[in-house]
Amino acid sequence: MSTKTHIPRLAWDAAIADASADPARVAWLADWLNTDAGQPYGQLLLECRN
């Protein structure tokens, strides 16, 4: 059985992992998510960071 890599998911996981190392980056990413995806997603990212 072969496995498939979901490239968009991999990119999001990498972006979140990278942002979590820097408080300024995670705040920027949360603001971006709030603008593009809606309020709950940016807030959830900030809660996960804490």
Image: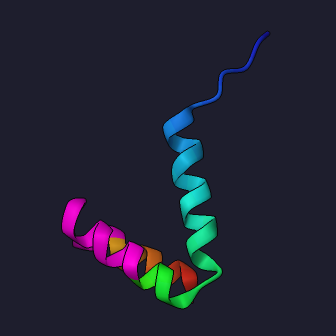
Q: Quadrant of the C terminus?
A: bottom right
**Which residue sits furthest right?**
1
Q: Residue 39, located in which quarter of the rendered image?
A: bottom left
Predominant SS of the magenta segment: helix
Colour mapping: rainbow
Point out the stretch of residues depicted in magenta: 28-41
Q: Quadrant of the N terminus?
A: top right
> x%, y% of residue 13?
59, 55
Left or right: where 23 falls relative to 33: right
At a point 56% along the width and 74% down the height, the residue shown is 19
> x%, y% of residue 22?
59, 85
Note whether 6 is above or below 24 in the view shown: above
At a point 66% along the width and 21% down the height, the residue shown is 4
At a point 55% along the width and 34% down the height, the residue shown is 7
Q: Is residue 23 magenta?
A: no
> x%, y% of residue 32?
30, 70
